Image (spheres, rainbow, N blue to C red):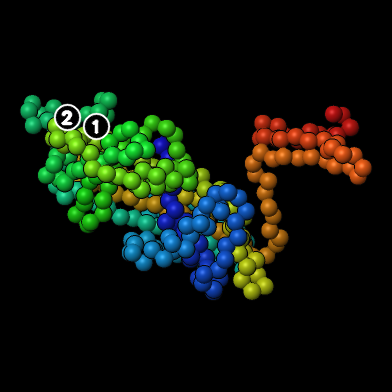
Amino acid sequence: MSTGLGILTIVKALEGAEEFIGKGNLEWNAENAYQRELMTRFDAIRDALPLIPTLNGWARETAEELNQILAEHGFDIRLNPWPDDGMTFGVVAINDFTVLWRVAGQTEESWGNHKITINDKPAFRLKHDAGVEYLQSNRHDELVIKIPTQTGDVVYITKYDRSSAGFDLLETIERLRSNLTPARREHYEGVNIPMVELDLHVNIDWLINLWTQAGMDTWKIAQALQQIKFAMNQFGARVKEATAIAAMRGGPSYYDVDGPFLIWIEREGVPVPMFMAHVTEDDWRDPGDLANL
């Protein structure tokens, strides 16, 4: 199953929330591992946002206004409505950009007009006049294909058959891009690449309950949605990505024990725990009446 992570629109949405609250550079407080991972990168990503003019954000008081923006930009994720009581607002962040190969690829063999395919799926071919380069990493057995574009952006593609999602996906790519070196593959005249039409609804529920303090007010993320669209063919690639969040004011903030946990029970005078266990999600369920255990 294809996966993705739109970290830029997440940071843009949180920045928009800060601006709506009226105080920039607020401290966001993480309550789970993914939120902490986001916070380690947050400042560096926010500093880079001005380099991305295609990245836009809208903060509004009602879900209806934000859902209309999502619809107008071709996304089908929708925020659940909230009471119009001034206690909740939302933000939508969208990034929409296209890159074009330096030289358009071909979709048919130069002989016989046969369509280029990979595993019977439509594909296209980029030759060396498109600036294709071959790289390698000592952390990966497959070639990494480097493709320049007309805008100066660079696309990298490499075969990778292990499932990777969320920040695991980002960390995998970070490891690969940290030590790429040229690979000698003179016998290749170009590269065949599958065409792609991707539409993902990305689960970013891990963002819920991220919270910040602004004066006397506590704000926490109550809804978090993301959709990623990606298309690639012989001409180039287009990315459309949206993140929608709702932030709620007031109310206590709670820490979630949202993973396997250790538990033990002590009693004064007893030198070892009365009970101890490591509990995984397999055993998370309502036990009913304790008297009937």
Name the N-terminal-most of marks 2 and 1: 2
Amino acid at circle 2? Lys
| The N terminus - image quarter | top left
Q: Is disc 2 surrounded by few (<14), some (14 to 19) or many (20+) residues within 10 Å?
A: some
Decide which of 16, 246 is in the foreground and name it.
16
Q: What residue appears at the point 40 percent right and 44 percent down from the top-left corner?
A: 175
| Direction left: furthest residue | 111
- Return the residue at label 1: 122
Quadrant in the rendering for residue 158 = top left
Q: What residue appears at the point 69 percent right and 55 percent down from the top-left corner?
A: 254
Dot 1: what SS?
strand
x and y percentages locating residue 206 in the rendered image: 56, 48
**Residue 88 seen in render:** no
- Return the residue at label 2: 115
x and y percentages locating residue 287 in the rendered image: 79, 33
Q: Are marks 2 and 1 in contact (CB under 8 Å)?
A: yes
Q: Is residue 96 left or right of residue 221?
A: left
| Disc 2 to disc 1, C-alpha distance | 8 Å
Q: Is disc 1 surrounded by few (<14), some (14 to 19) or many (20+) residues within 10 Å?
A: some
Quadrant in the rendering for residue 286 = top right
Q: Is residue 63 left or right of residue 87?
A: left
Q: What residue appears at the point 48 percent right and 60 percent down from the top-left corner?
A: 42
| Direction front: furthest residue | 271
| The C terminus - image quarter | top right
Amino acid at circle 1? Pro
